Amino acid sequence: MEFCFFINSVLLGFGLAMDTFSVSLANGLSEPQMKYRRMSLIAGIYATFQFVMPMLGWGCICTVVACFTIFKKFIPCVAFLLLLYVGGKMLFAGIRCKNYEQCDNKKLKFSTLIIQGFATSIDALSVGFANAEYNALMAFVSASIIAVVTFATSIVGLLAGKKVGTKLNGIAVILGGIILIGIGIEIFIKGIFNL
């Protein structure tokens, strides 16, 4: 494997991790007392999805190309709806609370983290399409690099969100919800208009 392959995979990882960075920032805002173990769990969930999706895309492009090409146009809509749902829940929870300490739902549920992981990594399926010329080992290594970059980027986002979230208190949950909805809109617009 060439040096350029590794550099391209790292850069691709950073490109794909920008959504997870933003979602991590929102999660850190909404949960400023988050412990490092929980941060590792959240980053691990996102990294796992960012690993699985390119591998799934690569596997599908090698087997059921026609079916997956049809699905590709729905990816922005699915990501938008999932992030709208999660962001909307956070937004309404934040509006109902007077300040962060009064909120019932300080911790994001595991199911919410799974939805976020799926929504932010669904565009990584197309990476698998682009990697169709890779052999199995190259596809695996590329997906692994993307996962490591995603993990690190998510940790940075969570730390930044926690730092700001502690200062913003009650507004943090609302801001986190708005960020998630904004990410969903961005993914939708980019996907629909091929930007």
Image (cartoon, helix red, strand yellow):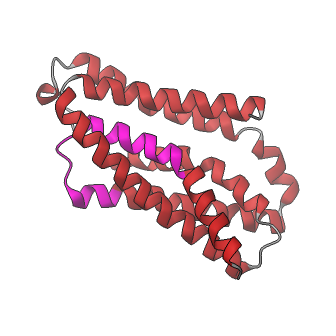
Q: Nearer the viewer, residue 32 or 122?
A: 32
Q: Nearer the viewer, residue 128 or 85?
A: 128
Quarter of the figure with residue 39: bottom left
Residue 67, above or below 1: above
Please, what is the dominant secondary structure of the magenta stretch? helix
Q: Position of residue 165 (x, y in %)?
A: 23, 34
Verify whether residue 18 appears in magenta: yes
- Which residue is rendered at x = 26% and y = 56% of the image? 38
Quarter of the figure with residue 99: top left
Q: Residue furthest right?
A: 66
Decide if residue 18 is on the left or right side of residue 61. left
- Which residue is rendered at x = 78% and y = 59% of the image? 130
Quarter of the figure with residue 53: bottom right
Q: Count how many numbered circles sit on residues in the image.
A: 0
Decide if residue 54 is on the left or right side of residue 90. right
- Which residue is rendered at x = 23% and y = 41% of the image? 163
In the rendered structure, which segment of residues is drawn in magenta?
17-41
Which quadrant, please, contains the N terminus?
bottom right
Decide if residue 97 is on the left or right side of residue 135. left
Residue 39, above or below 176: below
Decide if residue 168 is on the left or right side of residue 143. left
Q: Position of residue 47 (x, y in %)?
A: 47, 60
Q: Position of residue 136 (x, y in %)?
A: 72, 79
